[in-house]
Amino acid sequence: MPYRAWFQCINAECKATYPLNSVIYRCRACNALLEVEHDVKSLSRRDGKAWMKLFEDRYKTTEWPYGSGVWGKKEWVLPEISDENIVSLYEGGTNLFWAERLGKILGLSDLWIKLCGNTHSGSFKDLGMTVLVSQVKQMISEGVPIKAVACASTGDTSAALAVYCAAAGIQSIVLLPKGKISIAQLVQPIANGALVLSLDTDFDGCMRVVQEITHDESIYLANSMNSLRVEGQKTVGIEIVQQFDWEAPDVIVIPGGNLGNVSALGKGLLMLRQLGLISKLPRIVVAQAQRANPLYRSYLTGFASYEPMQAEKTLASAIQIGNPVSIEKAVRILKQFQGIVEQASEEELADAAALGDKTGMFNCPHTGVALAALIKLLKGGKIDPSERVVVVSTAHGLKFTDFKVHYHKKELDFNCRHANTPIELPPRVEAVKEALEQALQRSTRPDA
Ligand SMILES: *Cc1c(COP(=O)(O)O)cnc(C)c1O
Ligand SMILES: [Zn+2]
C-alpha cells in the first residue's frame, strides 16, 4: 500500500509528527491538538475521476469492509490499517433525502436532510468510533498494552464507543454526567457491557476527569480530542457530495457542541477539493443552542476573541458544552468556508424539530437547533431561497422521546405551538365520530 498517514500538530509553527500507533492526543512539544495528515502526493497519483469510480464501486456493497461508508474511503481515512483489525458495523451510507414539504413551508425549494442518525448506534458518532476502535485493535495486535478505551460523553459518544468495543471484544469505560442524558442513551452502553460511571457533574466536568484518567496509557482516550475520530467523521462531507453525483451543495448546516464534527465535515470537503473531486466549497453554518453558545459569541467578534463558558441546561443535551475541545479547528474551518454561526433558543429549537416532524421527519433536538438556525438565516436573508441546503441531522429522534413527549404534552416553559395532544375519549362510536368531525374541520397544514 503506497498511502501513508500520521498524526501532525495543528500548530503551524510546530507541525511535530507522530506515528498513528502512538498513544497521544496532544502535541508533546506544544500541547496543541493533533490531526491526521495524509500523504497527499501519493493520493494524487490517482486522479479525481478514478477516486470517484473507486468510491462508487464500493458504496454499500457487501464486500467487507469496503461497503461501509467510512471504509469505502479507507485510503483517505486510515490507509495502513490491516483489514483484519477493522471493527465495522456497516456505518455511513446514510440517506440524504429531499425534504420537499418542509422546504416549501420555509420557502426553500432545494432542502435536503442528511440522516446521520439512521445508523448502528443512532448517531453520527459511529463514523468516528469505527476508526478509533479499529486503530486500537490494530495497536493491541502490535503489542501496545491497552486495557480499555474511555470517554466522557453527553450520551451518543458513549453509545458508539460501547457498541464498537463490544463488537471488538475490548473493554469500554464511559463517564456520563448524572441525570443529564436520555434513558435511551444511558441504556445503550449498559446493554453493550461498558463500565458505566455516572458522575455528579456536567459534560465538561466528565471531560476533565477522563483526561486525568487517561494519563495512564493503558486506558486509551476516545473523545474527539483524539483526531482519529475526526478521520471517520470527515466522510460525512465526502458522502454528501458523492450522493449529489460529486457536486457540492451551496450550504451545509450542522449543529455544534464540542465542534469535532464541523471540523471533520470541513476536513473531508477540503480533501475532496485538494484531490480534484470538486472545485467549489459549500458554505458551512454551525448551529448552537443559545444556552451553550461559546462559538456563536466568538463569531460575533469575527472570531477575534473566544471565551469558554458555563453551559446551561438545554434540551439539546448532546451539545450542552461550554468549553469545546475543537474550537481552534472549527474556527479554522469556518474561515475557509465563509462560515456562519447561528444560535437557537429552547423554544426555537423545539418548535423547529416539531415542525420538521410534522412534515415527515423524526428529529432529535440537535437537528432542531440546525433547523431553527436555517429558519433564522432564511428570514435574515443570509441564505437565499434558491440555494441547495443540506441540514446534517445528527441523531435518531427515538433516542430523545422524553423531549418529544414533554413537547407534545406542553410540559416545557414555552408555548409548544406544534403540540399534538392525544384526545381522550370513552370507547363509544358516537364520541369518536364527534371528535373526528371537530378535529378534521381544523386545518391540518403543519404551518397552521
Ligand atoms: C456529538 C453530537 C453533536 C455535536 O457534535 P460535536 O462534534 O460535539 O460538535 C450534535 N448532535 C448530536 C446528536 C451529537 O451526538
Ligand atoms: Zn506542536
Image (cartoon, rainbow, N blue to C red):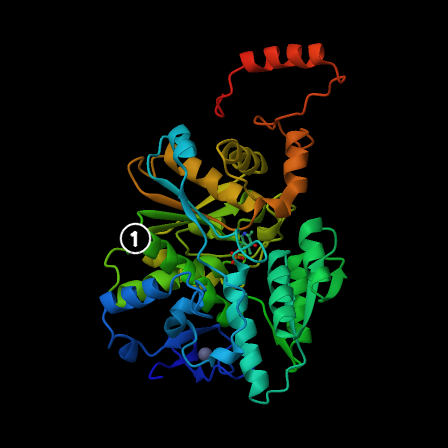
**For this rendering, which residue is in front, 13 or 164?**
164
Looking at the rendered structure, the secondary structure element under dot 1 is loop
> Is residue 340 depicted above or below 356 in this figure?
below
Task: Classify residue 48 by image quadrant.
Answer: bottom left
Q: In this image, 93 relative to 281: left or right?
A: right
**For this rendering, which residue is in front, 207 or 134?**
134
Residue 322 visible in image? yes
| Mark 1 crowd level (few <14, some 14–19, many ≥20, 10 Å Cα) | many
Q: In this image, 430 relative to 385: left or right?
A: right
Quadrant housing the N terminus? bottom left
**For this rendering, which residue is in front, 313 or 48?**
48
Residue 180 visible in image? no
> Is residue 422 depicted above or below 128 in this figure?
above
Q: Position of residue 210 (x, y in %)?
A: 66, 69
Task: Classify residue 13 by image quadrant.
Answer: bottom left
Q: Residue drawn 29% across and 54% down?
A: 245
Q: Position of residue 334 (x, y in %)?
A: 38, 56
**For this rendering, which residue is in front, 419 or 97?**
97
Task: Classify residue 177 by image quadrant.
Answer: bottom right
Q: Position of residue 197 (x, y in %)?
A: 75, 64
Q: Quadrant location of ligand 1?
A: bottom right
Q: Residue drawn 52% across and 31% down?
A: 358
Q: Which amino acid type corresponds to the residue marked 1 in the rendered image?
A: Ala
- Please give the count of numbered marks on the rendered protein: 1
